Amino acid sequence: MSGHSKWHNIQKRKGAVDAKRGNLFAKLAKGITVAAREAGGDVSFNFRLRVAVDAAKAVNMPKDNIDRAIKRGTGTGADRQIEEVIYEGFGPGGAAILIVCLTDNRTRTVAEVKRIVSKLGGTVGSQGSVMWMFDYKGVVSILNKTSIKDREELDMSAIDAGAEDLREEGEGLQIICSIRDLPAVTQAVEAQGIKPDGAQLEYLAKECTVVSDPEEQKQLDTLLEALDENDDVDAVYTNAA
């Protein structure tokens, strides 16, 4: 996996300080709302909702906040509807960027995304301009490989459940699979006594782009961080190596 992704977001969120907790809760609530709207408010039958709720519980988000977010998605809450919007573009060094937003106001969000991108050396492109460079896959993340008691058994179980690739990322492990196989692969990991740190649908770059200029790499990192910190941005992906 290359560049910024949900993987990096999970690591950041687990170490979030209290000063940023309100912003974090707001982002997680939007994810819960969208998941509930897509397939209902019962975590037993809605895998994406279960994942979103687990992520919220992992950072001690209050139950009332979670319940309100679910009600918002199922139409029983009084808040405005949240929708997913994806913006595409390029950053410094020519790196492709996908910006996944959850918003109740498209006009506000697109204006803010364009402002951040243009200010920090990037450009927002048209729909489809970079999407073709990414595959939409299921990703099960384990941040600390030391929690794996039997790596061979885990690998075999994951492959049997549909895993297409297993990638080591620093101290962690990512298990890549098709969208439809994500629930089965997640269950296979849990059957090994491991609680995944994330089980998400993510955009993975088909090929990596190397940003060779150190100054452009620094500018790209600054752009990705600024986007990730925006309230309406749920995830940022890039093909930068």
Image (cartoon, rainbow, N blue to C red):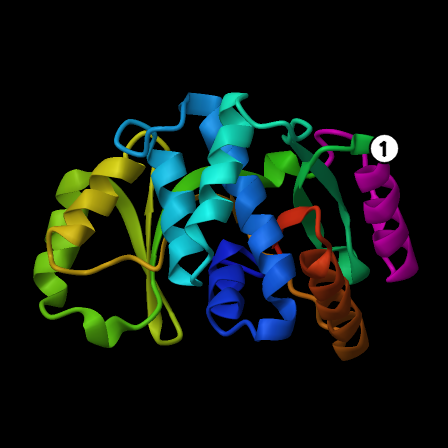
Residue 235: x and y, percent? Answer: 60, 50
Circle 1 Cα neighbour tier, 10 Å, few/some/many (<14 / 14–19 / ≥20): few
**In front: 183, or 175?**
183
At 35% across and 68% down in the image, what residue appears? Answer: 143
- Taking the image as shown, residue 138 lies to the left or right of residue 205, namely left
Please check the rendered image and state whether residue 35 is part of the magenta-colored stretch, yes or no. no
Q: State whether residue 94 is above or below residue 125.
A: below
Residue 159 image point, x, y percent: 18, 46
The segment highlighted magenta reads 108-129
Amino acid type of the residue tagged 1 in the rendering: Thr
How far from the left and from the top, in percent, is residue 94? 77, 55
Q: Please tell me how many numbered marks the rendered image carries.
A: 1
Q: Residue at x 21, y 37 (%)?
A: 184
Residue at coordinates 86% horizontally, 62% vertically from top-left? Answer: 120
Left or right: where does residue 110 sit relative to residue 77? Answer: right
In reply to whether residue 123 is colored magenta, the answer given is yes
Indicate the position of residue 4 as horizontal and vertical percent values. Answer: 58, 60
Q: Quadrant of the C terminus?
A: bottom right
Residue 235 versus residue 17: which sits nearer the camera?
A: 17
Establish if 221 lies above or below 132: below
Task: Name the residue tied to disc 1.
Answer: 107
